[in-house]
Every structure is written in structure tokens, then in C-alpha cells.
Amino acid sequence: MGEAIFTRCVNSPSILPIGKGGTGANTAWQARTNLEVEKITNLYSNSSGTNGTITLSQAFTDFGAIRVYYRVNEGERKSETFFNMGVSSPSVQLNHYNTNGTNIYMRAVPITFSNKTVTWGQNAWFWRENGTWGGSNSAGQIKVYRINGYAY
């Protein structure tokens, strides 16, 4: 009884361990993780990025959602989240768009998940400059540098 009164009456709040009704966390993200409301697992990480086959640390089917972090060359970083990945060998597409005045640039690459393997498709690069469309297959444009799995 004395311990319960102390934890409610203490002047400066403290973190309660899970066994005492708290989460043992300092942030909302940590609290969700500790309670396993949303558990995030790093499945792949490479600060240089890759545009080739990726081996995940766990099967993608163990997770309700997958977030893929990628960038174009060494430039802007983006991420895409894909839900309901529980189908056999799903393919998703990573897209990067930017504009420069009246010009439009788009880079895209399909990736396919299979168990612990992510297979890379062909990079494509499309653009519209001065009213004229162009395009090419351009290896190395989009690179994946991290993949996280989200379990709920």
C-alpha cells in the first residue's frame, strides 16, 4: 500500500516499470514498442544503399506492414509503407518524382518480396523537358538503404 501511495504522490513523475502499471519508457514510441502495440524490427540496413538483391533478417510475412527507405543517388530520402504483405511474392513499386519549373522527372523501380529475399527490378527513368517526353532504363538511380517490419 505504501508503495502505491508513493508512486501517485511523488512530486516529480518517474517512469513506472510495466509490473507497476507503467511501460518503462521515456517516449510514446518506446511505450508502444514495450507494450508490443507496434513492434518495429529492422530487417535490412545499409547506409550506402543498394539496387540489388536484398536478404532480410526475417521473413516479410512475419509483419503486418513493411516500410522501405530509399533515395535517388545520394539525394532526397523517401520511404513507402506497404500493408497486407501476406500474399505470395508481392511486387511493389518505389517511385520518386520531382519537378524543375516546367520539367518533370520520375524514377521508378519494382521490387518483389519472397520469404527473406527482396529482388530488384529494372530501374526506369522518365522525364518531360520543354514539352517533350523521354525515358530510359537507368541502373543505380533508386537505392534502398533500410527496410523495417511492423508487427501489430
Image (tube, rainbow, N blue to C red):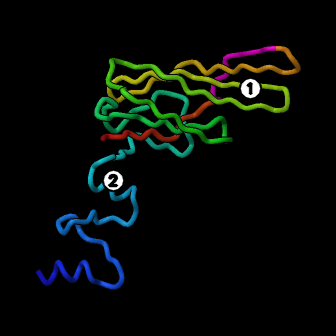
Judge from the rendering whether residue 46 lies leftward or rightward of residue 57; answer left or right: right
Answer above or below: position of 75 versus 88.
below
Judge from the rendering whether residue 1 lies leftward or rightward of residue 42; answer left or right: left
Query: Which label is found at residue 32?
Result: 2
Inspect the magenta stretch and tell me whether residue 85 lies in it: no
Image marks 1 and 2: residues in contact by CB distance under 8 Å: no
Query: Residue 109, how many percent across, how many down?
Result: 57, 23
Residue type at the position of mark 1: Tyr
Q: Which residues, given as a range, are shown in magenta?
A: 133-141
Q: Secondary structure at mark 2?
A: helix
Residue at 39 percent across and 32 percent down: it is 55
Residue holding disc 1: 105
Query: Residue 85, how many percent across, how many down?
Result: 36, 26
Tell me which numbered mark, 1 or 2, is placed earlier along the sequence: 2
| Quadrant in which residue 143 is drawn | top right
Residue at 27 percent across and 83 percent down: it is 9
The C terminus lies in quadrant: top left
Measured Cα–Cα span from mark 1 to mark 2: 39 Å
| Category of crowding for the residue at label 2, using alpha-carbon neighbours closer than 10 angstroms: few (below 14), some (14–19), many (at least 20) | some
Judged by depth in the image, the label closer to the viewer, 1 or 2, is 2
| Quadrant in which residue 141 is drawn | top right
Answer above or below: position of 105 versus 46.
above
